[in-house]
Image (cartoon, rainbow, N blue to C red):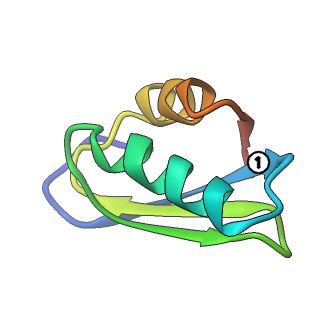
Amino acid sequence: METNTETNFLTLVVEGMSCDHCRVAITDEVSRVSGVESVEVDLDAKRVRVGGTDVDESAVIVAVDEAGYDAVAA
């Protein structure tokens, strides 16, 4: 994801998500990353969509890892 002041979106594939606890854990961790403005978790598609400005993709992946899941860029 390029660094700029416009809202950009990053989509990650996250395996192992299956319930609302998963959704809450990932949303809480990713929301703490600098620049993140929105987090949408799609359990069925195994995807997390992150919106924000100047969001560091690697920081988002680390946040997902801290929530207990593995993420890769889609």
Query: The N terminus appears in which quarter of the rendering?
Result: top left
User: In x, y percent, where is residue 12?
Assistant: 67, 51
Q: Is residue 74 above or below residue 9?
A: above
User: Is 38 left or right of 71, judged from the image as shown?
Assistant: left
- Foreground residue among 58 and 38: 38
Q: Is residue 3 above or below residue 27?
A: above
Q: Is residue 63 above or below residue 36?
A: above
Where, by quadrant of the figure, is residue 67 drawn? top right
User: Is 64 left or right of 7, judged from the image as shown?
Assistant: right
Q: Residue furthest front?
A: 21
User: In x, y percent, where is residue 23?
Assistant: 60, 62
User: Is 52 left or right of 19, judged from the image as shown?
Assistant: left
User: Is 64 left or right of 45, judged from the image as shown?
Assistant: left
Q: Secondary structure at mark 1?
A: strand
Q: Is residue 29 above or below residue 68?
A: below
Which residue was labeled with disc 1?
A: 14
- Foreground residue among 8 and 32: 32
- Foreground residue among 35 and 54: 35
**Residue sitting at x 62%, y 26%:** 65
User: In x, y percent, where is residue 36?
Assistant: 28, 53
Q: Residues within 10 Å of mark 1 (few under 14, many from 20)?
A: many
**Residue sitting at x 32%, y 50%:** 31
Q: Residue furthest left?
A: 5
Where, by quadrant of the figure, is residue 3 drawn? top left
**Residue sitting at x 72%, y 35%:** 69
User: In x, y percent, where is residue 28?
Assistant: 39, 49
Q: How many marks?
A: 1
**Residue sitting at x 71%, y 37%:** 71
Q: Amino acid at mark 1?
A: Val
